[in-house]
Amino acid sequence: MSDCPILFNKRIEDLRRIGAMGGRAYARNCRARRQASAQIAPVPALTQLPPVETTAQAIAALDARFPWLKGTERRCGRGGPK
C-alpha cells in the first residue's frame, strides 16, 4: 500500500481548514444548483387537448381503408346481437 500523506501528519488546524474548504464548496454548489433551477422557465400547460377519436370514427376509418372487412364485427357471431 502506498502512503497517503494527504490527511495524515496534519495538525488539527490544517484538518479544520480542509474541512472548511469542503463545506464552502458544498454551499457554493447548493447555491448554484438553486439558482439554475430557478432560472428554468416553467413549461406552459397545453390549453387544448388533442381530439379523441371515438369508436364509431375508428370503425368508419377502418371500413374506408379495408372495404373487404366492412361489417365484420357484426358477422363474427361475437360482440352483439345477430
Image (cartoon, rainbow, N blue to C red):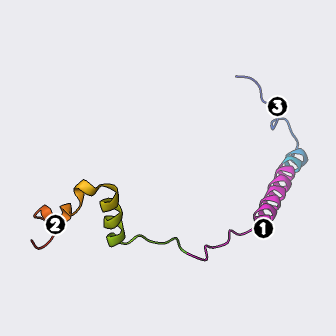
N-terminal label among 3 and 2: 3
Q: Position of residue 48 (x, y in %)?
A: 57, 76
Q: Which residue is mark 1?
A: 38
Q: Nearer the viewer, residue 57 or 29?
A: 57
Q: Position of residue 56 (x, y in %)?
A: 32, 72
Residue 8, compared with residue 60, is above or below; it is above
Q: Nearer the viewer, residue 50 or 62?
A: 62
Of marks 2 and 1, the one in the foreground: 2
> Marks 1 and 3, Cα distance to the nearest angstrom?
41 Å
Q: Nearer the viewer, residue 61 or 17?
A: 61
N-terminal label among 1 and 3: 3
Q: Which residue is mark 2?
A: 74
> Marks 3 and 2, Cα distance to the nearest angstrom?
84 Å
Q: Which residue is mark 3?
A: 5
Magenta stretch contains residue 38: yes
Q: Where, by quadrant of the figure, is residue 57 drawn?
A: bottom left
> Marks 2 and 1, Cα distance to the nearest angstrom?
58 Å
Of marks 1 and 3, the one in the foreground: 1
Magenta stretch contains residue 41: yes
| Quadrant location of the N terminus in the rendered image | top right
